[in-house]
Image (spheres, helix red, strand yellow):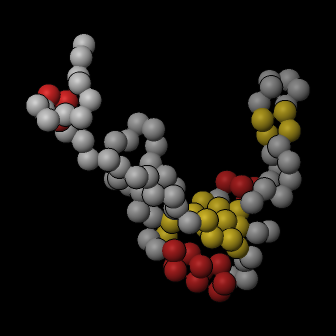
């Protein structure tokens, strides 16, 4: 019963960083998933895969895992590099490459 501690990335529908500053402790699956022959749903007998614990900081999540004797691994987030661009830069007179339609 090991767990992973990570900070979830923003969803594809988000343009900002709202609701992304927290950390999750999620248990690794112990049993493989299987397909239900009647309906075709994916099922699992592993109940711990449904547990997601939310923490404000990474240290709180690590402390919880150590206090309860849960082996864990921490996955650090990859920060996106954002460029500051301006629409008006497309029309500058000293532009290095000519802008055409």
Task: Classify residue 63 by image quadrant.
Answer: bottom right
Q: Position of residue 19 (x, y in %)?
A: 38, 55
Q: From the image, which quarter does the C terminus lie in?
A: top left
Residue at the (40%, 52%) spot, across then down: 81
Give the residue at x 14% y 28%.
91
Labels in figure, total: 0
3 above or below 36? below
Instruction: Say if residue 14 shows up in the picture.
Output: yes
Q: Residue at x 70, y 62 (%)?
A: 27
Q: Find residue 37 and report its image quarter.
A: top right
Residue 54 makes an appearance in the image: no
Q: Residue furthest bottom?
A: 67
Would residue 97 appear left or right of 91 to someone viewing this image? right
- The structure residue drawn at horizontal position 52% and vertical position 61%, both measured from the top left corner, is 77
- Where's residue 71, x and y in %? 74, 76
- Residue 79 % position (x, y): 45, 57
Of 64 and 100, nearer the camera is: 100
Q: Which residue, as the protein is rendered here, is positioned at the far top?
A: 101
Q: Determine whether, in the image, residue 43 is placed left or right of residue 3.
A: right
Nearest the camera: 28 or 73? 73
Left or right placement of residue 44 versus residue 54 in this view = right
The answer to whether residue 13 is above or below residue 4 is above
- Percent coordinates x, y for residue 82 in the rendering: 35, 49
In the figure, 11 relative to 80: above or below? Answer: above
């Amino acid at each position: 019963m090991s767990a992973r501690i990570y900070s979830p990335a923003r969803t594809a529908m988000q343009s900002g960083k709202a609701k992304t500053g927290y950390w999750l402790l999620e248990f690794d699956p112990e049993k493989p998933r299987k397909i239900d022959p009647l309906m075709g749903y994916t099922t699992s007998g592993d109940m711990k895969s449904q547990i997601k614990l939310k923490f404000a900081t990474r240290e709180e999540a690590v402390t919880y895992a150590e206090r309860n004797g849960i082996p864990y691994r921490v996955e650090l987030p990859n920060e996106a590099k954002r460029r500051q661009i301006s629409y008006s830069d497309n029309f500058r007179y000293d532009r290095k490459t000519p802008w055409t339609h």
